[in-house]
Image: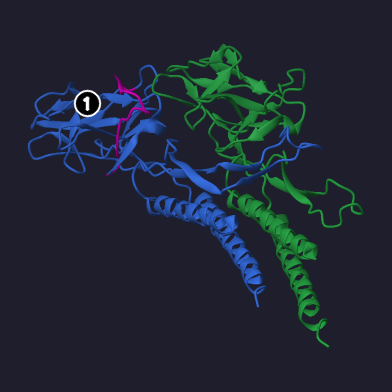
Amino acid sequence: MMRALSTAATGMQAQQLNVDTIANNLANVNTASYKKTRVRFQDLMYQDMRPAGDPARLGPPSELAIGHGTRLAATERNFVQGTTEQTNNPLNLLIEGDGFFQVRRTDGSIGYTRDGSFYVSGEGAVVNSDGLYLEPQVFLPEDIRDLTVSPDGALMARFVDSNLPEDIGQIELARFLNPAGLESLGRNMFAPTAASGEPRFGLPGTQGFGSVLSGFLEGSNVEVVEEMVSLITAQRAYEINSRSIQTADQMLSAATQLVR
Amino acid sequence: MTGGLRVAGSAMANFATRHDVISNNLANVSTPGFARQETLVARAEPLESRPFEVPEVTTRTAFEAGAPILTGNPLDLSLEGTGFFTVLTEDGARYTRLASLRTDAEGFLHDGSGNVVLGENGALHVGEGQLTVEKDGSLLVDGSFLDRLNITTFGQGDDIQRGAGGLYEARPGRRPDPTLVRPVVHTGQLEGSAVQPVPELVKMIQALRSYEAASSALRATDRTLERAVNDIARV
């Protein structure tokens, strides 16, 4: 049958996945620290029906190489800094620059996240909104007031009976050579893979690590207008490919009518 | 007797092939760095000597740059002018118009599809440093010079052939021409697909109608033959 039918079908399928990705970005336009994803298209293999420069043929080099459409090579996450949202809660932390907070997941492994909305649990531990412990663990004593987090990640507070701020914990960040290679776990968390490399740990504000801003949260980095433009482009590309299928169908119908 | 049938039939096959190529162009309307393919119809022999010789379709890659897509990522590169980035795949050196430079887990630069990007002195190790790319293709890590991107230029469009994934390879026996002007490297943008939907749709309509015309010609020939076979002999 006609190659064009399957070629155009690959185009439609790829555009459909493109729309799925855009929809997911738009659904997460208000998700704290969400990082937008983009699909990457690649052309499929070319079939050399008649390679150029075939020694058995005379005349000018003439090739006939027909492509088989497109495919999605990858979805790529864009780790550009998201918007800054002020909350005034001292345990809401934003990383200005590179780095991830570490939380201990229920299975014991470490999840990496840029969502810095932390809370104090009943037992005084610093946990994230899912109740997962911040790593390295920080416990807040009961009789403290005026909790602050400095840009270098130190948690300082005054004890009720004293006026001097004291050091009660330290936040450590992790970073990766290739953050685009991280695996998304959902719930704003990422896990390292062979592509991302092993995490490197450090204190906020030191060699390559971003500093911590207390009282702020990182918003989503999705730009609605940009997504809308992509959505329109994807829709039209889908339609064009469907037209291509219709044309191939008309050709086949003209061919079938030849037989009387 | 059946020469006319054969010619009209292969004309239909040729227009279907044309449509295959147009479909592939349209399927890649969003593929970054995609270069459009054109079809040409060529007749090898003069018409008089072999009236039923069928012309054949050939394809050619039109190397026109697509409109840039602004990504804002300083490590997304595109080239202004003819030339290619050089990457190393499992099958050897390949050329591409597209480079989303990324560091892999060991700190080497790759092109976003897992192929090693080559500098003039081989693979590029960036490590954890801050990479910046200059217009002439120089790579700076934390402000100090590392290497220059290996940009390959070819004298003629048919020195290279297409592979999958936006990669090109040199045809057997063809060599790059390093004396040509190097293209300018732009950062923060990728080369878009060079496919323009409207001209492709126009060509698609042309292919369809030509196909239908050829099928009418075939049917007319068929009717003529029917007359010859069934009616003329009748007394």
Chain rendered green:
B
Please give the range of residues in magenta: A187-204
Residue B2 falls in image quadrant: bottom right
Left or right? Give the position of B163 relative to B59.
Answer: left
> Residue placed at 55% from the left, 41% from the top?
A45
Mark 1 residue element? strand
- Tell me which chain the residue with mark 1 is part of: A
Residue of label 1:
A155
- Residue A98 at what x, y percent from top left? 39, 27
Provide the letter of the chain coloured blue: A
Q: Residue A22: x, y in percent?
A: 45, 52
Q: Residue furthest right?
A: B48
Residue at 72 percent across and 38 percent down: it is: B63
Quadrant hosting residue A60: top right
Residue nearest the viewer, comparing A50 with A152: A50
What residue lies at 81% left-to-right and 77% top-to-bottom?
B228
Above-or-below relation of A240 to A146: below
**Vertical arrangement, residue A17 with respect to residue B190, above or below:** below
The picture places residue B27, in percent across and down from the top left corner, at: 58, 52
